[in-house]
Amino acid sequence: MQKKNGKSRISVIGLGFVGLSLSVANAKCGFPTIGVDINEQKIANLQKGIPDFFEPKLQEMLKSALSSGLLEFTSNIERAILNTDLTFLTVGTPPTKNGKVDLSQIKKVATKISQILQKKKRRHLLVVKSTVAPQTTDNTIKPILSSFIDSGKLDLVVNPEFLREGSAIDDIFKPHLIVIGAYNKSAGKKLENYYTKFYSKMPEVIHTDPTTAEFIKYANNAFLATKISFINSIANICQQVPNVDVNTIANAIGKDSRIGPLFLKAGPGFGGSCLPKDLSALIEFSNKFGKKNTLFKAVKEVNDTQPQRIVDLLQKIGVLGKNKTISILGLAFKKDTDDIREAVSIKLVKELIKKGNKIKVHDPMAIGNFKKIFGNKITYCDTTDNCLKNSDCCVLLTEWNEYRKLGPNDFRNRMKHTNIIDARRILEPERFSDLNFMAIGLGQSEQQIP
Ligand code: UGA
């Protein structure tokens, strides 16, 4: 691949949702880009323009990037490193059972890069984008590559990513901030120069050291998690107080600019591949220093117990157990993704299977992933109508736009008993007052709850 219009040649190692979105976005901005992954099936599909997960706008952009000739995919990491100037490291850092982070993919790739760099003459810039605990680059990545850093053949920079699943492409093009954690000024400047060619309007940049950059990412996600557990704690109290609604409270406090309106949506608890994992890893990291980390443990505990609130409501209305059918609308951990990692739907369905319930599920995107876990233990429905048919209770678990359109008759005409639990607060309670409608954070008088 040739450098084009003075733009660096980019390689991206690890084609999960961050790596693939980044590869496509780079090609779109005119950078010759090579995406690398060890999964050959994934590479074969990507070469045909087929991503292995759903992300809005991604597939169209992937196809146009491939036809522009600026994007290619390979399993050959050596070819990618030798033919590019800047590599983004975006391999997975999944959680281990004890809440730590599995660094095996990071170590493997860093070791491979150190072997390849022996064959490379030109200087290379390696940018760590994978989310890792503070001091990981210092203690784990740098030692593997130190001889190349010391001899000036390699610049190593930490550059955390803040994009969200479901809006990854928009977030890449409009970040609120770029954090650059470098060992020396010139390496940090090099990465900033690349970004000045990527963005027509340069976002704000904060330059710092690698450990602080890693810490910023953890602190960012921990704060978001804290906001959600905070509002869920308020919601759980609201639910006990007749006529009080957490949404009114969240709307009001969100107008205080010191608080802000975002991430105050009460619900079944946060899921996904990032907030739960990063929170546990931050708790683990702080344990190393022997300090009791009361706040983050509480944030985690609130989140871990939040799905039980739904089970409690199901118990209250008497629909737990054999001969009762529960319909679940929404399986993905949030809308606009097919990702079910750490999704509340998994915890809830496991619990309901234990209770002996018959379970029917619907999701516009995530059924395929859910089948891999639950096989033929539950019923998968292709429409909301089928999912609601003859059901004793419906739980709304993901805020997909199509569920917002449901009206009282959609439930009334299909369900055996019109019990509804809106765990995402997407339906207007007033419209459903004739049905047995319950919602997270909605205080209802005893008469309203059967
Ligand atoms: C999160 C962060 O928002 C990104 O900035 C970060 O880059 C990313 O993790 C990461 O570390 O890679 P993501 O996991 O895609 O992004 O999803 P979020 O939009 O943060 O939602 C996480 C969970 O919180 C979802 O289950 C969502 O439904 C829940 N949530 C979010 C609430 O329950 N209430 C809210 O008000 C907001």
Image (tube, grey):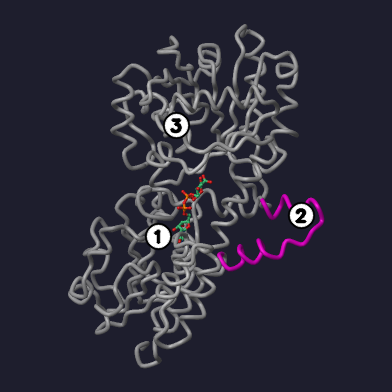
Q: Which residues are magenta?
A: 282-303
Which label number is shown at residue 22? 3
Q: Nearer the viewer, residue 252 or 26?
A: 252
In the figure, is residue 221 to the left or right of 296?
left
Residue 64, percent across and down? 29, 26
Amino acid on which disc 1 is placed: Lys
Vertical position of residue 156 compared to residue 7: above or below: below
Residue 170, percent across and down? 38, 41
Amino acid on which disc 2 is placed: Asn
CB atoms at circles 3 and 1 under 8 Å apart? no
Q: Earlier in the sequence, mark 2 or mark 1?
A: 2
Which label number is shown at residue 377? 1
Label 1 within 8 A of ligand 1 by Cβ:
no
Q: Nearer the viewer, residue 88 or 361?
A: 88
Residue at mark 2: 287
Which callout, 3 or 1, points to the residue nearer the camera?
Answer: 3
Element type at marker 3?
helix
Please tell me how crowded label 3 is: few (under 14), some (14-19), or many (20+) other residues with Cα within 10 Å. many
Element type at marker 2?
helix
Q: CA distance from mark 3 to mark 1?
A: 37 Å
Q: If the image is split into quadrants, where does the N terminus sit? A: top left
Which callout, 2 or 1, points to the residue nearer the camera?
Answer: 2
Q: Earlier in the sequence, mark 3 or mark 2?
A: 3
Amino acid on which disc 3 is placed: Leu
Q: Quadrant of residue 252?
A: bottom left
Residue 384 painted magenta: no
Label 3 within 8 A of ligand 1 by Cβ:
no
CB atoms at circles 3 and 2 under 8 Å apart? no
Please tell me how crowded label 2 is: few (under 14), some (14-19), or many (20+) other residues with Cα within 10 Å. few
Vertical position of residue 2 compared to residue 445: above or below: above
Q: CA distance from mark 3 to mark 2?
A: 33 Å
Q: Quadrant of residue 290?
A: bottom right
